[in-house]
Amino acid sequence: MIEVVRAGACVACDICIKVCPTDVFERGADGVPVIARQPDCQTCFMCEANCPTDALYVAPLSGPAPAGSPQADQAALEEAGAFGAYRELIGWGGGRTPGSRLDRNHVFTAMLERGGP
Amino acid sequence: MSELDLTADVVVAGGGPAAAWAAVKAAEAGADVLVVDKGHLGTSGATAAAGTGVWYVAPDADARAAAKASRETLGGHLADHAWMDRVLDQTYANMNELAEVGRYPFPVGADGAQIRRGLQGPEYMRRMRTRVKRAGARILDHSPVTELLVDAEGAVAGLAGYRRQHDQSYRVRAGAVVLATGGCAFLSKALGCNVNTGDGALFAAEAGADLSGMEFSNAYAIAPEFTSVTKTAFYSFATFYRGDGSVLEGAGSQRGRSVIARTLLSEKVYARLDQATPEDMLAMRLAQPNFFLPFDRQGIDPFRDLFAVTMLAEGTVRGTGGIRLTGFDCATSVPGLYAAGDAATREPICGGFTGGGSHNSAWAMSSGTWAGQGAARHARSLGSRALARTTHGLGGAGLRPAGTPGDPSAFNDVIKAVQNEVIPYDKNLLRHGDRLAPALSVLDEVWRDVRASLHGENGDVVRARSAAAMTAHARWMYNAALARTETRGMHKRQDFPDLDPAQHHRLLTGGLDEVWTAPEPAARGGLAAVAS
């Protein structure tokens, strides 16, 4: 689930509010989005992928992170280089190669047609 | 705020690939198009969050024959060669168009040619949104449909819904409607599927359309425990283990999911992708990067470490049941109403075996194309009469309670009650009449309450309607599952473990307060050309 919005990195562009398919965010008084409906988050990572300033972190858990978990600890996540990691993987952002150029889905389709590895 | 009142030639409900292709092709056919989605066209649904292969086969007779034959037996011989041929042709055309017009950055092979057999969801759907806008279609995001509008003759003449981010209801009068709202995964949190609550099937049934293949609705995907990330194909490289470290014999991702499910009823099951070569490992990372997020972000190496797994319900998203189509234009049995993608039955190309992956993506772009074109033709045939019709809304359960409106937060209890009957493996996946019948009784009782009193206030009207749609979906599923007293395709009955040649037909279902099932008349199904 979405766990962290880094206010310091956010440019208040509203993109996450627009792209979240389950409408989890609300615009806060200062323009920075707040996680208004976390139980509706389906952990699809689309907000994180679309954030232009790597201000969001989606923990890979389908429920809320337990109290004290590093999955909701901004400093620990920054230390681990977690912000923006998914966006880099799919090659979104200036100067990057789109991940689809390196796609290998066809390899697995062919494998399944053969009946396995 | 006052209601937003709009008009269009064609209104498309949905935000995934089928909706996007329908919008593009209807607009290219000259229609004024409006797309309304529950979420955001470009990120909504099962495709946008994932990566997928595509059933893209060059127009070579032998290759096409092999492609069609590969799943016929798995699908219980319920697919149709004429439909498969058309989907293979249309998919080939659309993928080439995606490269040439959409400028999708496909990978390039050693021979310098693009490899057009796969798509990455985020990139694909981002570009499809751009295509939709450039085609001139308007988009209302975060505007779930709540009901269809019909004219005095019962032909579909528009739809109504609610704009969640504006707290405003809206109404669109239109010449034709395309339902591309996806299947139903019962809010299981399977990757990207929580917008898919079967809303389109409910709307269609309220207008009098019938459904087909609803017994093929027991898809489950393997995921690491407590996560959302499904990609069953990658578990082809897994060995499955019990808690004591012994190998779980017979467990597998393609054949052998039942063993995993049966074991999960009483104990944990662990997996390790220990059959992958270094080349496979790299290919997996490149094919679907988010598959690795649950592992990388929790410090798990899935190739070396054991990790607990679960199976997430995917219902009719990767099952094959849905709204029945009456022809290649993706019309339904109701005039003015078209269906595409997972909202429609995928039996024409998959029969009764999971439409997931390459077949579903091919079906979405092909049926979306045809539904968009068909809807545009229908709207044009009505001319100026289309918008002059007097309309009324059809929404019943969850919108207009038949009795005294109840607690406006009751949708939460309805959702839990439905999930209790359709998500457990021993009810839906490991099917037996002794468990299906009592589950259906509970669901019928839930439906009676829903119909009598369920409603929602303001934006919660959407949640109430989704809860009603899930209830209806579950009842069609279990009525069909009880009616098919054999094992065929993904529908496996423990009390009827064999295929029964006398049931080599598709099964139609429909109705709301009274649900019915009936074999599809042979004249309609086109199954005569298919060997049993």
Image (spheres, rainbow, N blue to C red):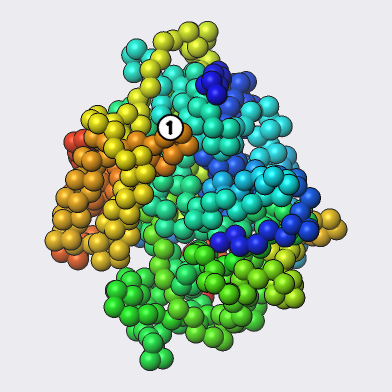
What's the chain of the residue with tag 1? B
Badge 1 crowding class, 10 Å Cα cut-off, few under 14, some 14 to 19, many 20 or more, is many
Q: Is residue A46 left or right of residue A37?
A: right
Q: Residue at x 30, y 65 (%)?
A: B425
Q: Quadrant of residue B486?
A: bottom left
Q: Quadrant of residue B102?
A: top right
In the rendered view of the protein, which quadrant contains the N terminus of chain B? top right
The residue at the far front in this view is A29
Q: Can you give x and y, in whole percent of width and height, for residue B405 in the image? A: 29, 33
Q: Can you give x and y, in whole percent of width and height, for residue B287 in the image? A: 63, 65
- Amino acid under label 1? Thr
Q: Residue at x 40, y 67 (%)?
A: B311
One can see residue B447 in this view: yes
Q: Measured along the vertical axis of the image, is residue A80 above or below residue B63?
A: below
The residue at the far right in this view is A95
Count of number-bearing discs: 1
Q: Residue at x 52, y 8 (%)?
A: B384
Residue on which disc 1 sits:
B146
